[in-house]
Image: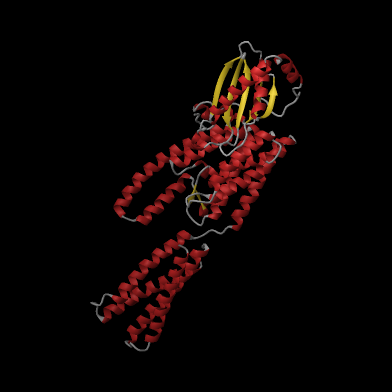
Amino acid sequence: MAWGISPRKIAVIPLNEYSADHYLTLIYHAFNNLGWHIDYFNNDGIIAYTNISWASYAEEVSVHIVNNQAIIKSECVGYQALFTDYEKNEKNLELLYGEITYVEYHLKQNLQETTQELMDNIPDRQFISFDNPPLGYKEKLRSFLSAFTPTKGYTITPVLVLSNIAVYLISMVIMAAMAVVLSMQTAQHHDNLQNLNNWEDIYLSLGFGSRTQVLSGQVWRLVTNTFLHFSIMHIAGNMIALIYIGSLIECKLGKWNYLFIYLLTGVCASITSVIWRDQGISAGASGAIFGLFGVLLALLSTTFYEINARRALLISTTIFVAYNIIPIGRQIDHAAHFSGLISGYVFGWIAYWGIKYQKQNLVAAAALLITVVYTSTCIWLAPIYELKELQRLTDRTQKLSMALNNDFYKNYELTHDQRLVMFKNKALPEIDSLSKVGIRMDKLSLPKKQKQVATIKSKIILEECKLYTLIYKEFIDNDRVKYRNEINSATQKINTLRTEWGKIEESSD
C-alpha cells in the first residue's frame, strides 16, 4: 500500500536482452489490452491512464526508459483520502506484469516487425511528454522534504508553505506570552467579558481579519489573515491541500502568475468573508487554496490538458472541491471558500487565454484589476456595524438600571428630605443618562436581528425613563392617584416590549 500526498508505486526493470523499442512495444500492446488510455508514446517511454470506476478515478501509469532500464510507475492522479492508494497502484503493476507476459508470448515470433511498424508511426509532435507531464511537479514529490524544497517548477508553493508555518509558530509564541498576561489579569478582575474582548484584541494585533477594522480602512488585513491560522489542525489541513494543488499548477502558470493569483484569490475570499460575517475574526489560507482549485477547474474546462489526463483530474478535483465546500459546520468559512473558488475560476480562464495567446504578462494585471474593483465595491457598499458600541451601551444600560432600581425601590431607611436630595443629585442625572443611551442605541448601524433587538431595547429604556420620572413626580406631589394610570401604562408597555424581545431571540435560535 502506497502513502503520501501523491501515492505511487515504482519498479525498475532491467531490459536485459530487449532493446528499448522492443520493450516499449510490449508495453504499448499490454496497455491496449488492458484498455488503458495512452496519451504519450515515444522512444523514451509511454504514459497512459487507467479506466475510471467507483474504486478509482484513474491512475497515471508510465514507463520511462533510462540507461537501459524501464522505470515503471503507477501514480494516483487525484487527492486521496488518508493519503493512501488502497493498493490501487500495486494492483495496476501486477496487471501490467501479467499482460506483458501474455503479449511477450504472442509477439515473440514477429516482435521485430511489430516494433518497426509501431516506431515508424510515432507522431512528430505530441501533446505531452516526460519533460511536460500532465501532473506537473506532483509526480516529483518523492519524499517528505521534497514538499518543502523550492526547485524549478515548484518554487513559490514551498515558500508559501514555509511562510505559513513560520507565521503560525511565531503567532503561537506571541499568543502564549499574551495568554499568561491575560490569565493574570483575569484572576485579578474576574471579568469574563473583558477576557473575551482581550483575546479578540490579541488576534487583531496579530493581523487577523475583522469586519470593522477592514471596512474602517485596514485593508492590509485581507492579505495578512491568509497567512494566519487558529490551530495546528487548521494549518496542517490547509498546507497539505496547498502542496497538492501547488504541485499541480505552479509549473503550468509560471511562478509569478501563480503567486499573484494565490494572493489575489486570497484577497477576494477575505473581503467576501468580511462582509458576510456580522462580527468575529477570520483567518486561514483556505480561501486562496480554493482559488487555486478554481484555477485548475478553469484549465480543465479547456483544452489546456490532454483529454484523458483532463478527465481524470476533473473527476478527482470535482470530488475534492465538492466534499470540502459542502456548507456543513458552523466554524467553516464557507463565504471565503466559495469566493476563492469563483475568483480562481475567473482568473484561471484569464491565465488560459494569457498562455494560449502568449500574453502571460497581462494575467496578473487583469486579475489585479478585477480584485481591486471587487474589493473596493464591497468596502464601499458594506456598512460598518457598531456591535462593540451596542455591547458598551448594553453594559451601560445595565449599570444605570441597577442604580435606578436601588434609588427608587430601596434606601427606605432614608428620610423624606434625604431621598429628595438623592433623587435630585443622583437619580435624575441617571435618568437623563439612561435616556441618552436609549436614543443612541436606536441610531446604531447593526445587522437586521441586532437592529430589531436594539430598537426594542431603546423603547424599553425610554419607557423605563418615563416610569422613573413619573415615580419621582409622584414622590414630589405626594399623590399616589394622580400618576398611577400612567405608571401602570408604562409598566405594561415595558412588559409587552420584553415579550416581543424574547420572541425575536427565540426565532433566531
| Residue 246 percent across, percent down from the top left | 58, 35
Taking depth in this image into account, of 120 and 255 the one nearest to the observer is 120
| Residue 214 percent across, percent down from the top left | 54, 51
Residue shown at the point (26%, 75%) measured from the top left? 411
Q: Is residue 346 above or below residue 304?
A: below
Indicate the quadrant containing the C terminus: top left, top right, bottom left or bottom right.
Answer: bottom left
Q: Tell me if 398 is positioned left or right of 340 in this view.
A: left
Q: Quadrant of residue 258?
A: top right
Q: Quadrant of residue 35?
A: top right
Residue shown at the point (75%, 24%) measured from the top left? 123
| Residue 104 percent across, percent down from the top left | 64, 18
* Extreme residue toward the top, this view: 17
Q: Is residue 490 above or below residue 349?
A: below
Taking depth in this image into account, of 232 and 48 the one nearest to the observer is 48
Residue shown at the point (45%, 44%) measured from the top left? 230
Taking depth in this image into account, of 385 and 244 the one nearest to the observer is 244
Q: Is residue 226 above or below residue 11?
A: below
For the question of whether residue 21 can be seen, the reply is: yes
For the question of whether residue 364 can be seen, the reply is: no
Q: How is the image coloured?
A: secondary structure
Q: How many marks?
A: 0
| Residue 134 percent across, percent down from the top left | 64, 31
* Extreme residue toward the left, this view: 413
